[in-house]
């Protein structure tokens, strides 16, 4: 026996338990959602609120500088806590131009790409967007 309070075997058991606890703690930490986002410039053609299984879906029907139509959804999950989907939908106006930060809707359980940031009102399409036609 090597004297001392903790023997070699006990030391390894304690280290093993600490390792397992650290590993478990790391696995339980919330993971950051690093979804790919992009910015689009659009003109709002139509706004609608559709009810699906008792839940309101806030949709924006848009048109880009090339005349291509797209539908975007405003969902609370994608916006986070700073803004409500209902208020964001109310603030956006038809026939106005906006820059929207969007992401894939599938990640939030949506059928359409989701708006995941503030909608910025702009004075028509920018030169870069118009030149891409």
Image (cartoon, helix red, strand yellow):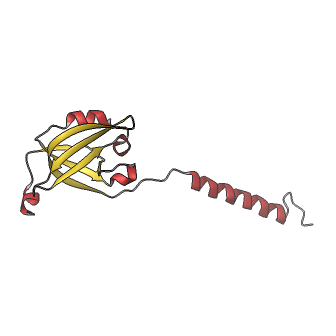
Where residue 7 appears, as percent x and y from the top left, is: 85, 62
Where residue 128 appears, as percent x and y from the top left, is: 10, 60
Left or right, 12 with respect to 109, comes to right
Left or right, 1 with respect to 119, comes to right
Name the residue nearer the viewer: 71 or 88: 71
Left or right, 60 with respect to 43, comes to right
In which quadrant of the rendered image does the C terminus lie? bottom left
Where residue 40 appears, as percent x and y from the top left, is: 20, 54
In which quadrant of the rendered image does the N terminus lie? bottom right
The answer to which image quadrant residue 39 occupies is bottom left
Left or right, 91 with respect to 24, comes to left
Residue at 39%, 38% in the rendered image = 53
The answer to which image quadrant residue 12 occupies is bottom right
Residue at 16%, 41% in the rendered image = 46
Q: In this rendering, is residue 5 above or below 44?
A: below
Residue at 28%, 39% in the rendered image = 58
Figure label count = 0
The answer to which image quadrant residue 84 occupies is top left
């Amino acid at each position: 026996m090597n004297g001392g309070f903790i023997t070699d075997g006990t030391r390894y058991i304690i280290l093993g338990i600490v390792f397992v606890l650290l590993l478990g703690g790391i696995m339980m930490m919330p993971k950051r959602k690093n979804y790919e986002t992009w910015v689009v410039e659009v003109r709002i053609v139509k706004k609608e609120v559709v009810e699906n299984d008792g839940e309101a879906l806030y949709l924006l029907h848009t048109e880009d500088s090339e005349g291509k139509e797209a539908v975007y959804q405003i969902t609370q999950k994608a916006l986070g806590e700073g803004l409500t989907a209902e208020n964001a939908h109310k603030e956006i106006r038809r026939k106005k131009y906006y820059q929207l930060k969007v992401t894939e809707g599938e990640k939030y359980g949506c059928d359409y790409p989701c708006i995941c940031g503030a909608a910025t009102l702009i004075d028509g399409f920018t030169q870069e967007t118009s030149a891409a036609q």
